Structure formats: C-alpha cells, structure tokens
Amino acid sequence: MQNTATHYDVIILGGGAAGLMCAATAAQRGRRVLVLEKANKVGKKILMSGGGRCNFTNYSIEPENYISHNPHFCKSALSRYTQWDFIALVERYGIAYEERKHGQLFCQDSAKDILNMLLGECEQAGVEIKTRCEASTIKCVNADDDAVFSDLNRSDNKKATYQVGIAGGESNVYCQSLVVATGALSIPTLGGSGIGYDIARQFGLPLTECRAGLVPFMFSDFMKPICQRLSGLALEVEVRCKGQAFTENLLFTHRGLSGPVILQISNYWQPGDEINIDLLPEINATEWLLSAKCQQGKSRLNTLLNKHLAKALVNELQTLWWSQLASSPLAEFSDKHLQTIGEQLNRWCLKPSATEGYRTAEVTLGGVDTNSISSKTLEAKQQAGLYFIGEVLDVSGHLGGFNFQWAWSSGYSAGQFV
C-alpha cells in the first residue's frame, strides 16, 4: 500500500452483522464510512448460521432473553431498532422467510439473502468495504495537525480523531468515529478473536469475565461412553440449571451432549454445576410407573418406556437403574424402586466435565463492561468517538435469533450517532 492518508467520518472494524448494519445506517445519514474486515469476505457468521438459513430474529424479543452483568443495558437499543424494523427491511427486499417453533424466523432459501440485503444497503449508501484488512495499530491523535486532518469534515461535537494502521501495509486511515464490531472469541475459524478486548483495554475500558456460551457439554465420567454409543440420537427434554429451564431437543454426540436445549442451558452453567434432565417432560413418571404396575403388571419396564423413548436410550437407562430386574415384569418391582426410577426419569442429574469451548461456541459470554458504554449511543463514556457494538460487548442472547437482533439493534443505534 502507498504511504497516503485516507480520511473517513467513520471506520468500522469488523464486517459482521453488527458492523454492516452500523455502516449502512451511518452512511444513510451522509457519513463517509469504511469497513475493515480481516477475513477474505464479510458476513461469514451470517452465512453459516441456522444451518445456512440464518435465524435472523425472533417474533418475541425481550430484555429477559439477554444475559449481561447489567440486564438493563440492552433495553435502549432493542427499543430503538426492534425485530419489526428488521422484518420490515427483510420484506422490503422480498426475502421469503418462515417461522419455526419459539418464534424463530429463518430464511426459506439461504442466509445469503440476508448478507446480500445488508451489502445492498451498504452499496446504495456508498459504504466502502475492504476485506483482508486488519487493524494493526490504533491511536487517538492530535486534531490540531493540519497536515493530517485538513481533509476531515469535522463536526463540532467530535472531539477525537483516530489513526488506524493497516496490518501488512504502510498507510494509515483516519476517522472521527471508530466503531469496534470485531465480534468475540467464539468460533475462531469464522474470524472470532479478542482484538476488540485489546482495544478496550488500550483505552482503559474494563472487561467482564469471558467464557464460551451456547456451547455443547463434554463428560469424563460414566456418561462419556454412553454418549458415544447414543451419538446421533435426539429427543425433546427439559433441562434445568441454577433456576433456569428450557424445553428443546437434546442431541447425544460422540463428545457429550448438544442440541438447542443444551446450548441454552450452557449460558447458565459453571464448572462443577449439575444439570437436571427431564426425559419425560409431559409425564409425572412416578405416578405413571406405579399406575402401570397395577394395570400392566406383566409388562417389562423397558417395553413400557420404549413407547416414549428410543430403544437404545432405554437400554442404557436399564443398565444404569434396573439391570438386575431387566427381565422381570413390573409387578416384581417394589413401589419404592419404581418411585426412584420415576424420579430419575424426571430429574436425571448429570455433571458435565467441561464445555467444548470457543471452538464450537455460538457466542461469547461477557466482554466489554457495559457500565463504561452509553446504552443510547454505544459510545465509550470516557473516550469520545469510540464505539462498541455487537458481541464484543457484555450482552449475549439466548438461542433463537436473539444475538442477531442484538447485532441489528446495537449496530443501528450506534449508526445514528457516529
């Protein structure tokens, strides 16, 4: 690259969901916007989400669907740009979508439709996007240097100017407003990194503790071989942990447990915690088994359970809980033993050894402390002109389109003020 300075009103670091939304919004206000994306193309996480169909929002978006040390922080942005606003944009582009359970909205065709829509918005507004460009240095510099800043169309309320050095090049770019939309640590193969946290630290902004969220569990005890043998089996269950409960599909994998219900509860689980799985969430298993003993005393327990659970799973449970009576009819089970089995069916207590970590996590819990960020503008309170949006912040949503809605809402809100 040539050693020439290029001046913008806004530079956005990261070409993901939040960054592209912010770019389009700011450019539509007449701001000159540059997006720097370190990967070879923008929107990689959009393209892979929802099995390639992109679960782009949810009909029911509430602050309670988000996890943050400051649960009130997300309210301003979510009300400024709602799910209905994004749905209207999707409909304006004629993108076909469908509702799945729990109000989740997916593209009927491809996630490419959402990315192309965002790129279309950016192109119409004149956004400049550069891929394979990573910021190597960031400085807040002296605005009195006429040689550097003569090209900047400064507004009276902008008190800072940022110099961004491009990795592998010799040139710098300059802006009044610098937006950090770099994502977080989850799924590093799609560009996840901690650079946004490094920028926050550089300017003295505090961070909350980070950990993997919406992530599968692993086991090191007796459950590991069971999960391996049942790998690929899915069933709907209720899972509880720390007062939180979700009812969704559970999936056995060769590493442990996954599926939507496990990803949801993983946001609340900490190492050492147990999870409680209700294998028959619509049935009081104890009452059902005791009744069956009276009415179907000649039946075997595994025959009874096979009506509700997969045979392979029932065989594993039999080995765990009633192996000595495997060939016996229900009538030979004591009421106390059936009560114990019933309680275990409705409350199977397991202790994961760990999660799969950031490699497969869909989000990163924690991040830039929201107490240091304006909930209205997304600007750092003590660093004028520096903004943080999307996953880099300590705001994480449940599974089901909530994290994309946070990207749209926070990106739009910042785009109104940069």
Image: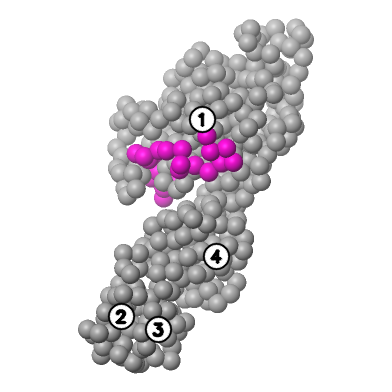
Residue that badge 1 annotates: 410
Measure the alpha-carbon separation of dots 1 and 3.
55 Å
**Residue at the location (22% across, 84% down)?**
295
Read off the magenta span.
47-72
**Residue at the location (70% across, 7% down)?**
150
Q: Earlier in the sequence, mark 4 or mark 2?
A: 4
**Residue at the location (31% across, 48% down)?**
100
Measure the alpha-carbon separation of dots 3 and 2.
9 Å
**Label 2: how many Cα within 10 Å (few below 14, some 14–19, many 20+):** many
> Which label belongs to residue 290?
2
Residue 109 position in % (x across, y down):
33, 42
Note whether 190 is above or below 4 in the view shown: below
Which of discs 3 and 4 lies nearer the camera? The answer is: 3
Q: Amino acid at mark 4?
A: Glu
Q: Amino acid at mark 3?
A: Lys
- Residue 254 is a magenta residue: no
Residue 360 visible in image: yes
Residue 23 visible in image: no
Which of discs 4 and 2 lies nearer the camera? The answer is: 2
Residue that badge 4 annotates: 274
**Label 1: how many Cα within 10 Å (few below 14, some 14–19, many 20+):** many
Which of discs 2 and 1 lies nearer the camera? The answer is: 2
> Which label belongs to residue 336?
3
